[in-house]
């Protein structure tokens, strides 16, 4: 059978034979693709043909198509041939270049008297006629998201309807939060658009700086997807997901998106807004713009908080704001193996609760590597690295990890070569109290490269309490292991402290409750010690460190730095207990030492407690540099010399020892003049 060109499997032939592919250059549609002819009408005709056929692929062969405002329907996909299939945004209208939008009806009031609770699997509504099984509802209320960027975003979530019974909607899955009856909970009926696909295309804004609505918009879509798409010089979001159920982005690239918040242009590569949930984003790169990814923010999707979003293998460089971000609208957002390098602000920032970072890298950003802001409680950072983050000429920034929200857990993280602290925990003079922060197997080394005095391996800012370090490695700090500002409840367990260049392990105003347990440190200089200035510190099982108590307060009512142990019983006085562990078994306890400056002691003094007039109190006992024992003028008390009748029972002694004894109502004072040789004098009453 002879070959006929009409039999070739060209897009045109596929279109005429199967109805699956609609090539915009088909004579039936007439797109030119020369970059100057407006092809909007031709492409719209191809989209209409695909819609009439019940779906299909609108195909763009190589070329540059000047277009604007392409509106897509169910199961109609856009696909090109890669980087050289270009949609050039003409800017004729201030709308997204490509739009997929489902439908919504008017919200219906939830009539359950007690409202809706987390864990519920259904709600009672005033009427069910506008709902359908397998469609979705946006369950929400009038309760505002605290501190949201737009200021009027309310809580809400997307739920799939599993069944309808009389006045009750049942859901696939459970409600994730509470909606109080006083906040007017409601259910918004949604019919999702299906089959939204954009693949193998490049999109460029022909007139950057004039639009606000970006390139591709998915609203009320089920499982929208993009793959192998490039975005350049756009205004607004390159990819916008509003109230979407599921969806995927793979191999996306964005460059030079306009970041002009003053004119409502936000250069987001990917924005998840409204009640979008279960979106998967992977293998994407962002150069410039505002954020590679964020949630919420300023958008028209005002009800709902995105949740269950997974962002994997993303990179960002040169952004004007944090490379990766969430606004307050968000829940359970996870970043995995993402890199934020060379941005003009933070590497990563979250303002949403329960955000998680795994295996991410923040390097050479202008301020902090990772920032957990005050609204982002219960976050986790695992196996992440923050290095070389700094701000030229501003030493107050450039921390490796900055934690400003409670209940954060950091494990396996590394902070190195940052301008300020390795880990900064606390919220300064404002914001909420930061409690219960845990660092496990983390490392801080060679930070505090700036000149600020208030930095360290770990900086505990004010409004901080309940910080625990376990198994951490802390080294090469020029200031202190800890720098604290009046915080409380610090636990440091099983850490390795080494190669320190600081004068103290603790600096600043010390916490009011501190425990140091089982830490390992081999100080390289006498200056490496725990400088404790509080009255409730507990140090247990420390090895190779010094304990220095320092206080110059004269008033005994204000004295601190008390080292003590619990009494043996409720009616006995507190005691100081010392245990030594040596290489040779011995039951001899030797007490010696020197000053905090590392000088050997040449004199030992024992004082009574300080009083209101002196800082040291009254000296009662002194051993001078010649080894002489000098007692105060107060009552002299010595041990009795052996059995009754003098030294007959025990004559052992060394020269210089003094004892006393009595026999037959006569008292004697004994002086040992040489080994085991004594002389005595009778003591007569005055």
Image (tube, helix red, strand yellow):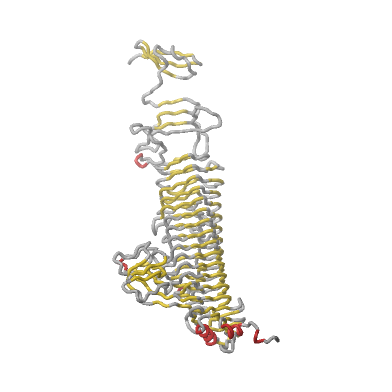
Residue 125 at least partly seen: yes
Task: Establish if 34 lies above or below 357.
Answer: below
Residue 398 percent across, percent down from the top left: 51, 59
Q: Residue at x 36, y 42 (%)?
A: 558
**Of all residues shown, which one is farthest toward the top?**
664
> x and y percent of residue 611 in the render?
35, 36
Q: Which of the 4 quarters of the picture holds residue 227?
A: bottom right
476 and 276: which one is in front?
276
Given residues 623 and 371, the one toward you in this image is: 371
Residue 553 image point, x, y percent: 39, 42
Q: Position of residue 507 (x, y in %)?
A: 46, 48
**Placement of the C terminus among the 4 image quadrants:** top left
Is residue 264 visible to us here?
no
| Picture layout, residue 237 above or below residue 328 | below
Quick check: 34 left or right of 124? right
User: Residue 136, located in which quarter of the rendered image?
Assistant: bottom left
- Which of 447/518 is in front? 518
Nearer to us in this view, 109 or 631: 109
Q: Outermost residue toward the right?
A: 2
Tag count in the figure?
0
What residue lies at 34% left-to-right and 34% top-to-bottom? 570
Furthest toward the front, the residue is 1
Q: Is residue 468 left or right of residue 66?
A: left
């Amino acid at each position: 059978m002879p070959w006929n060109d009409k039999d070739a499997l060209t897009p045109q032939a596929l279109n005429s034979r199967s109805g699956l592919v609609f090539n915009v250059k088909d004579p039936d549609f007439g797109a030119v693709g020369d970059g100057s002819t407006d092809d909007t009408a031709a492409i719209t005709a191809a989209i209409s043909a695909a819609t009439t056929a019940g779906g299909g692929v609108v195909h763009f062969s190589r070329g540059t198509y000047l277009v604007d405002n392409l509106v897509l329907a169910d199961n109609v996909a856009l696909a090109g041939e890669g980087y050289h299939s270009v949609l050039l945004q003409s800017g004729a209208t201030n709308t997204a270049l490509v739009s997929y939008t489902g439908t919504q009806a008017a919200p219906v009031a939830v009539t359950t008297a007690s409202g809706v609770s987390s864990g519920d699997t259904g709600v009672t509504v005033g009427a069910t006629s506008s709902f359908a099984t397998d469609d979705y509802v946006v369950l929400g209320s009038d309760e505002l998201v605290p501190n949201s960027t737009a200021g009027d975003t309310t809580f809400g979530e997307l739920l799939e309807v599993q069944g309808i019974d009389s006045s009750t909607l049942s859901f696939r899955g459970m409600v994730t939060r509470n909606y109080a009856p006083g906040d007017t909970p409601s259910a918004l009926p949604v019919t999702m658009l299906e089959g939204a696909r954009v693949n193998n295309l490049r999109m460029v804004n022909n007139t950057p700086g004039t639009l606000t609505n970006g390139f591709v918009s998915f609203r009320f879509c089920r499982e929208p997807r993009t793959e192998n798409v490039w975005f350049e010089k756009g205004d607004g979001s390159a990819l916008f997901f509003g109230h979407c159920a599921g969806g995927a982005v793979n191999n996306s690239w964005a460059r030079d998106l306009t970041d002009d918040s003053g004119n409502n242009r936000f250069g987001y590569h990917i924005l998840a807004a409204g009640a979008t949930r279960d979106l998967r984003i992977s293998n994407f790169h962002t150069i410039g713009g505002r954020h590679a990814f964020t949630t919420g923010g300023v958008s028209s999707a005002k009800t709902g908080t995105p949740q269950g979003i997974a962002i994997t293998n993303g990179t960002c460089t040169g952004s004007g704001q944090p490379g990766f971000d969430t606004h307050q609208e968000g829940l359970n957002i996870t970043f995995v193996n993402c890199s934020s390098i060379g941005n003009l602000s933070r590497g990563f920032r979250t303002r949403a609760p329960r955000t998680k970072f795994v295996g991410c890298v923040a390097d050479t950003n202008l301020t902090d590597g990772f920032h957990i802001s005050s609204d982002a409680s219960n976050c986790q950072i695992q196996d992440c690295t923050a290095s070389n983050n700094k701000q030229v000429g501003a030493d107050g920034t450039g921390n490796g990890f900055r934690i400003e929200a409670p209940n954060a857990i950091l494990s396996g993280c590394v902070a190195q070569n940052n301008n300020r602290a390795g880990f900064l925990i606390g919220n300064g003079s404002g914001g909420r109290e930061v409690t219960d922060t845990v660092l496990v197997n983390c490392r801080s080394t060679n930070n505090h490269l700036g000149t600020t005095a208030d930095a360290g391996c770990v900086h505990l800012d004010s409004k901080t309490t309940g910080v625990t370090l376990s198994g951490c490695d802390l080294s090469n700090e020029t200031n202190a292991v800890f720098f604290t500002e009046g915080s409380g409840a610090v636990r440091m367990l099983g850490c390795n402290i080494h190669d320190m260049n600081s004068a103290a392990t603790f600096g600043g105003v010390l916490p009011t409750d501190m425990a140091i347990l089982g830490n390992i440190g081999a100080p390289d200089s006498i200056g490496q010690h725990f400088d404790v200035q509080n009255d409730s510190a507990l140090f247990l099982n420390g090895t190779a460190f010094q304990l220095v108590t320092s206080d110059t307060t004269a008033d005994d009512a204000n004295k601190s730095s008390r080292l003590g142990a619990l009494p043996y019983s409720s009616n006995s006085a507190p005691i100081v207990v010392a245990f030594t562990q040596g290489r040779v078994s011995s039951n001899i306890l030797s007490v010696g030492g020197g000053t905090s400056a590392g000088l050997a002691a040449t004199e030992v003094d024992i004082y009574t407690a300080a009083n209101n007039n002196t800082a040291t109190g009254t000296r009662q006992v002194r051993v001078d540099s010649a080894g002489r024992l000098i007692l105060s003028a107060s009552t002299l008390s010595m041990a009795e010399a052996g059995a009754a009748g003098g030294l007959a029972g025990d004559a052992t002694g060394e020269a210089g020892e003094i004892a006393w004894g009595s026999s037959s109502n006569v008292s004697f004072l004994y002086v040992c003049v040489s080994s085991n040789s004594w002389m005595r004098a009778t003591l007569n009453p005055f």
